[in-house]
């Protein structure tokens, strides 16, 4: 997978990708991340990339030409062009997985200031937001996309680690524990110390249902539950009401 990130702040991106799992993924040639400074693609003097909006109003707007020049320089017939913006489709695990499996090259444009000239939209495939709040720029959002996609690429993290993780089958992850067994009287569930694999699997599945029910009940509406799962959740609800 190759990412091309078009940004006004190349150092922000560089700094994040030069540590941790992303760094290792680059070293193992699982991903290639190319950082492009938008200021190198303007036709205007003084590296100008933004200007006042027509019609009046506060704030600077990114101009269409530098962005389109940069896209056209890096785009191939295998590229998906994503624009980060609070007006975009909200990013989620399903989109992440879809692009991790089906894309070879993703170009991400980091939005800035009051936004970008509307005509930029004719040159992008997808406008993406990372949630319902406003950031000062698209760099954090672009890193969120790169991170969430990269960790799903084969060989980047242990394969099994995403089989049970949060949002897999629309459930949150199960609760996990490590030593000590007893912390100030709070003890690790006994079944996890039993070595009984089937019981541990059952505990973990129920833990995923319970965590989802308690923390993100909205996710439970989005999926088909088995009869046993429904019974388990009903018991949980009844116990809560007692
Ligand atoms: Cl992608 N960009 C900006 N500027 N703000 C955001 C966002 C993106 N996603 C949520 N808020």
Image (cartoon, rainbow, N blue to C red):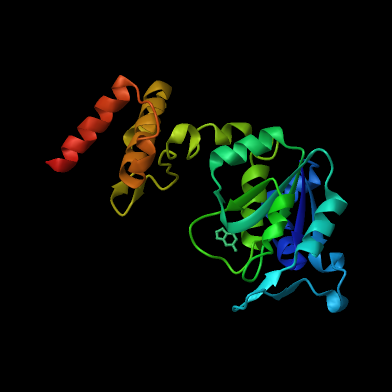
Q: In the displayed structure, would residue 116 be above or below residue 80?
A: below
Q: Is residue 89 visible?
A: yes
Task: Please name whichever residue, 200 or 183, is drawn nearer the observer in this view of the structure.
Answer: 200
Q: Quarter-wise, where is residue 143 in the image?
A: bottom right
Q: Residue at x 84, y 42 (%)?
A: 76
Q: Taking the image as four quarters, which one is ligand 1 found in?
A: bottom right
Q: In the displayed structure, would residue 194 be above or below residue 106?
A: above
Task: Please name whichever residue, 50 or 236, is drawn nearer the observer in this view of the structure.
Answer: 50
Task: Please name whichever residue, 58 or 158, is drawn nearer the observer in this view of the structure.
Answer: 58
Percent of width and height locating residue 42: 85, 68
The image shows a total of numbered marks equal to 0
Q: In the displayed structure, would residue 122 be above or below residue 79?
A: below
Q: Quadrant of the C terminus?
A: top left
Q: Residue at x 72, y 51 (%)?
A: 122
Percent of width and height locating residue 239: 17, 38
Q: Is residue 211 visible?
A: no
Q: Quadrant of the N terminus?
A: top right
Residue extending furthest toward the left: 242
Q: Residue at x 81, y 42 (%)?
A: 29
User: In the rendered view, does 188 fall on the left or right side of 11?
Assistant: left
Percent of width and height locating residue 104: 77, 38
Task: Please name whichever residue, 33 or 45, is drawn nearer the observer in this view of the structure.
Answer: 45
Q: Residue at x 64, y 56 (%)?
A: 84
Percent of width and height locating residue 2: 78, 44
User: In the rendered view, does 58 fall on the left or right side of 208?
Assistant: right
User: In the rendered view, does 172 fall on the left or right side of 38?
Assistant: left
């Amino acid at each position: 997978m190759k990412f091309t990130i078009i940004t006004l702040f190349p150092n922000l991106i560089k700094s994040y990708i030069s540590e941790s799992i992303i760094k290792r993924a680059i070293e193992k040639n699982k991903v290639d991340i190319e950082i492009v400074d938008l200021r190198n693609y303007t036709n205007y003097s003084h590296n100008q990339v933004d200007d006042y909006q027509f019609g009046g109003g506060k704030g600077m707007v990114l101009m269409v030409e530098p962005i389109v020049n940069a896209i056209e320089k890096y785009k191939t017939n295998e590229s998906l062009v994503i624009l980060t913006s609070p007006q975009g489709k909200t990013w989620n695990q399903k989109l992440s997985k879809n692009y991790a499996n089906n894309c070879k090259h993703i170009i991400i444009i980091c939005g800035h200031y009051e936004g970008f000239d509307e005509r930029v939209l004719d040159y992008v495939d997808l406008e993406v937001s990372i949630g319902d709040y406003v950031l000062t720029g698209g760099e954090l959002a672009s890193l969120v996309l790169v991170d969430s996609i990269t960790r799903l690429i084969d060989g980047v993290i242990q394969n099994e680690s995403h089989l049970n993780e949060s949002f897999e089958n629309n459930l949150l992850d199960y609760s996990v524990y490590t030593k000590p067994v007893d912390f100030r009287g709070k003890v690790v569930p006994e079944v996890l110390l039993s070595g009984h694999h089937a019981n541990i699997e059952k505990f973990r599945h129920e833990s995923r249902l319970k965590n989802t029910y308690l923390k993100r009940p909205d996710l439970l509406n989005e999926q088909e539950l088995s009869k046993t799962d429904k019974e388990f959740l009903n018991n949980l609800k009844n116990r809560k009401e007692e």
